[in-house]
Amino acid sequence: MAKQEIATLGGGCFWCLEAVFDEMKGVLSVESGYAGGALPDPSYEAVCSGTTGHAEVVRIAFDADVLTYAELLEVFFAIHDPTSLNRQGNDVGTQYRSVVFYHSEEQRQIAEECIRGLGPGVVTEVSAAPPFYVAEDYHQEYFANHPFQSYCLFVVGPKVKKFREKFGERRK
C-alpha cells in the first residue's frame, strides 16, 4: 500500500508543472488549481486579474515510499526559475510566483533546507498550505490534450524536455 503524501507547489503556469510531474515515478496524481488567495473558489479569469492573491499551483499526490519530498522539490526547483519574483518567462503577476505550500512541519523544514542549498537570490515563498481550489476542467492535463498549442510547444514542451534530460531515471 502506498504511503501517500500531498505536495502543493506553484512555479509559473500550472500547465508546465502538471506536465512534468505527470511523468514522474512515484507521482500518483496531479491536479492544477489555485491556492493562497482570499477569494473562495476563484475562477481562472479572477486569478489572472492578479487581484485575488492566488497562485497557479499543482496539488501532487505521491507515494512517499517511491519518491521523497526532497526529490520532488529537486525537480520543482530545476524546472522553474525560483529567483524570478512574481514571474516565469512572459507570465507576469503574483499568480505566477514561486511558492511551496507545505502540509506538515517536516515539509516546511525540507523546503527551507532545499532553498538554502540553492544559494542566494531565491524568492520562493514557503507557507502553510491554504485551501486548494481545483482549476476548471479544461486546465487539467492541458499539455497532454493540447501538445501542439503554441504555448505548449514553446513553454511547456521545453520544460518537459528539460525534465526528461536531467531526470530521465525518475520517469515513469
Image: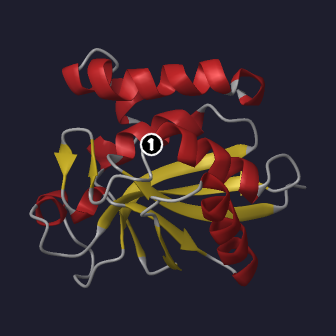
Tell me where residue 64 sits by quadrant: bottom right
Q: In this view of the protein, which residue sits in the foreground, 85 or 70?
A: 85
Q: In this view of the protein, which residue sits in the foreground, 7 or 70?
A: 70
What residue would you read off at disc 1?
A: 80
Going 64% across and 66% down the picture, which residue do you hit?
Answer: 111
Q: Position of residue 163 (x, y in %)?
A: 58, 27
Q: Position of residue 161 (x, y in %)?
A: 51, 19
Quadrant where the N terminus is found in the figure: bottom right
How many marks the image carries: the answer is: 1
Does residue 38 appear to the left or right of 26 in the view shown?
Answer: left
Does residue 98 appear to the left or right of 5 in the view shown?
Answer: left
Going 64% across and 70% down the picture, which residue do you hit?
Answer: 112
> What is the secondary structure assignment of the residue under circle 1?
loop
Q: Position of residue 85 (x, y in %)?
A: 30, 59
Amino acid at circle 1? His
Tell me where residue 164 sits by quadrant: top right
Q: Residue furthest top?
A: 148
Q: Position of residue 123 (x, y in %)?
A: 42, 63
Up/down of 8 relative to 143, above or below: below
Going 69% across and 80% down the picture, which residue do you hit?
Answer: 104
Does residue 161 appear to the left or right of 32 in the view shown?
Answer: right
Up/down of 82 relative to 139, above or below: below
